[in-house]
Image: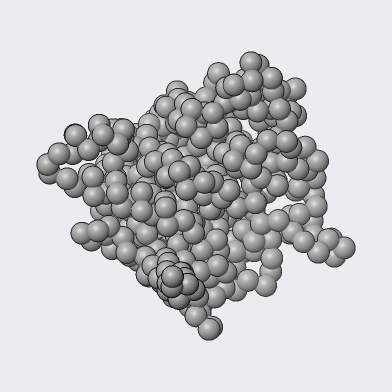
Amino acid sequence: MNQRWTLHVENFARIESADIEIAPLMCFIGDNNSGKSYIMSLLWGILSNSNLFYRRLKKSDTYNECNQWLSKAVQKKDIVIEDKIEQLYLKWFNELLLDNKEELVKRIFNNENIAIGKLELLNFKRLKKLTVEFNKSIQFNVSHIHTIDVLEYDETDKIGITIPISSEDWDIIYWKSNVFICWNIIMMGLTDIFPPEGITSQAVYLPASRTGFLLARREIVSKSIETLYSLANFDNNIQERLTAPYIQFLQIMNNLKDSDNFYDKKNTPLIEFLQNELLHGNVLVKSNGKIIRYLPDDTEGKEFPMSITSSVVTEITALLLLLKDKTPIKLIIIEEPEAHLHPSLQKKIAQLLIRFVHIGIPIWITTHSDTILQHFNNMIKLKKRSTEREELMQEFNYSEEDLLDPEEINLYQFERGEKHTTIKKLESGKYGFIANLFNKAIDELVKEIYAFQEVE
């Protein structure tokens, strides 16, 4: 993640106002029904609905300024985008976001009744500059302008754009090029637009009800999802519609491939951790993705259908299959990663989340687990240790990839009020993050323990 920005939203669902600064590891905690999933879904929607920002040509003064810069930039071979140009493209992005915010929310939630007042990205900065390489082509095909040919796409912050030597469609070419540059300035490494041919990169949302959806996926094929649950094809006889993140999750699970030999090899340590530390076995995809089987380590090759495995297996399976899929995953959002897990496994899943960050996959979660939060705190404290760190790591079986820098994580507490939800960014101090809502619940339980204990 070579950029940082803050999502600013007003009058959205129960949330009067919120500022969410993204980070490689982001954690939402707090009351039920306080808006955690709403904000996560909104973030996912901004990352996943790039078509809202380039599907029609709309000129503005800000766009004209971007275009003027681009018309000069294309005369060069390579150009580094400076701060003032980054802010110019951000301004244009926010204009488009403002124009499309109602439609964006409608697309995400498949509902026309969720209002949103203000939506914009603030406090933008890049940790590494973005370089654009322009290449001139005689054989440029205007009919395929919507895919803009990318000569080089490198996550070390370099992108390539091919443009014709001459054309009668410069307005369209510049529009598409501006969108490509704008999106990569803000979103590169989180999700991609105009990816290399044959590759789809994406931000993936794993919903809290993933076990039920995983078990039902064979009956809900991707075409029927689009037909039955999308707002565009809404039938008044259908009372319940899935949100866009849920639809995406089902489509991914319905398009699994039998072979797991084509996944990104950087995922191998994560796959092995899931199999050895949480599943104690493997998950196999068969019959062209129609069948999923669990193969425990201790059954001498006997496989079991998902319907008769434990909830731990079904909860973890979706994450494992994502890592084994050939589609590069840019970012993962998980609702309640602790669901159905014993506290010892909750600690393991927290360990895994940190390892995701360290191989370059940002991961954002909602959670009610004080165990996960405490593990984050422990890894922050261990990272800060100036003495005996190596001895402690060896004693408790941790490595450098398990440690957590407080700069890598942002944690937000959602507290439900009578009318509105208050969202507070928690700061990491001497003892890590202090989550008052967790502590309050624990304190009340302890009071009951002492009050109800009979004196002997």
Residue at image coords 38%, 37% = 355
Q: How many marks?
A: 0
Quadrant assignment for the C terminus: bottom left
* Up/down of 213 relative to 309, above or below: below
**Residue at the extreme top:** 300
Q: Is 313 on the left or on the right of 439, as rendered? A: right
For the residue pair 352 and 223, the one nearer the viewer reads as 352
Is there any visible trace of residue 219 in the rendered image? Answer: yes
* Up/down of 369 relative to 454, above or below: above
**Residue at the extreme front:** 456
Q: Position of residue 242 (x, y in %)?
A: 71, 56
* Up/down of 20 relative to 310, above or below: below
Is there any visible trace of residue 58 in the rendered image? Answer: no
Q: Position of residue 444 (x, y in %)?
A: 44, 73
Q: Is 221 on the left or on the right of 21, as rendered? A: right
For the residue pair 391 and 319, the one nearer the viewer reads as 391
For the residue pair 133 and 158, the one nearer the viewer reads as 158
For the residue pair 225 and 353, the one nearer the viewer reads as 353
Residue 233 lies in quadrant: bottom right
**Residue at the extreme left:** 387
Residue at image coords 65%, 51% = 209
**Residue at the extreme right:** 237
Residue at image coords 53%, 41% = 202
What scheme was used to colour the molecule? one colour
Q: Position of residue 114 (x, y in %)?
A: 63, 71
Quadrant assignment for the N terminus: top left
Q: Position of residue 250 (x, y in %)?
A: 68, 43
Residue at image coords 64%, 16% = 300
Q: Is 371 on the left or on the right of 407, as rendered? A: right
